[in-house]
Image (spheres, grey):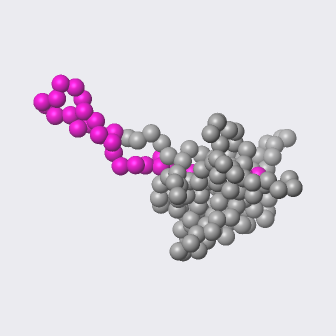
Amino acid sequence: MAANTTPFNTFKSYLMVGSGSSTITYSKLVDIKEIPDLGQAPATLDATTLSDPAHVYIFDIEDTGGSFEFTANYTKADFTTVKALEGTEQKLAVWFGATESSGVFTPSGDDGKFPFTGFVTVYKKGASVSGVQEMGIVVSPTSLPELETA
């Protein structure tokens, strides 16, 4: 299936977890409701000298902006699945796009794959009247998410 060439909505967006060492195989971690920014505008450093007629800036090192927090519906099973990943660095990715067969959607990443590594933790979010029970999946990244081009 060819990738989209026009804007598309957030339907068929997935948080994936990888396994394997030489060849990484990804599977959907849990269904998610919200994806955080996967980076931020780069910081700049003032490199102006006394000979410059205007300020001169250079880019600083890249920064993710801190932790990534995904939101998911809370179920005991999903919470337990994510909790099992705590304590070890994980191969993760955000995938956009899926194939459909008989009403079942399978993540494909045809519209983009953003792999990265990081440490995962999960917590139960607060709740209110007439609300859906949710959990936060927090990733402390150890690499930058970048669009996979291969």
- Compared with residue 125, is residue 24 higher up or lower down, i.e. above or below? below
The stretch drawn in magenta includes residue 72: yes
**Residue shown at the point (73%, 44%) measured from the top left:** 11
- Compared with residue 71, is residue 28 higher up or lower down, i.e. above or below? below
Given residues 150 and 14, the one toward you in this image is: 150
Given residues 128 and 51, the one toward you in this image is: 51
The stretch drawn in magenta includes residue 15: no
**Residue shown at the point (70%, 61%) measured from the top left:** 28
Given residues 117 and 86, the one toward you in this image is: 117
In the image, 104: left or right of 21?
Answer: right
- Compared with residue 38, is residue 9 higher up or lower down, i.e. above or below? above
Say which quarter of the image contains residue 49.
top left
Number of marks present in the image shown: 0
Residue 5, position in %: x, y?
62, 39
* Residue 99 seen in the figure: yes
**Looking at the image, which residue sits at the far front?**
2
* Residue 67 seen in the figure: no
- Magenta segment boundaries in residue numbering: 44-73
**Residue shown at the point (56%, 65%) measured from the top left:** 91
In the image, 150: left or right of 27?
Answer: left
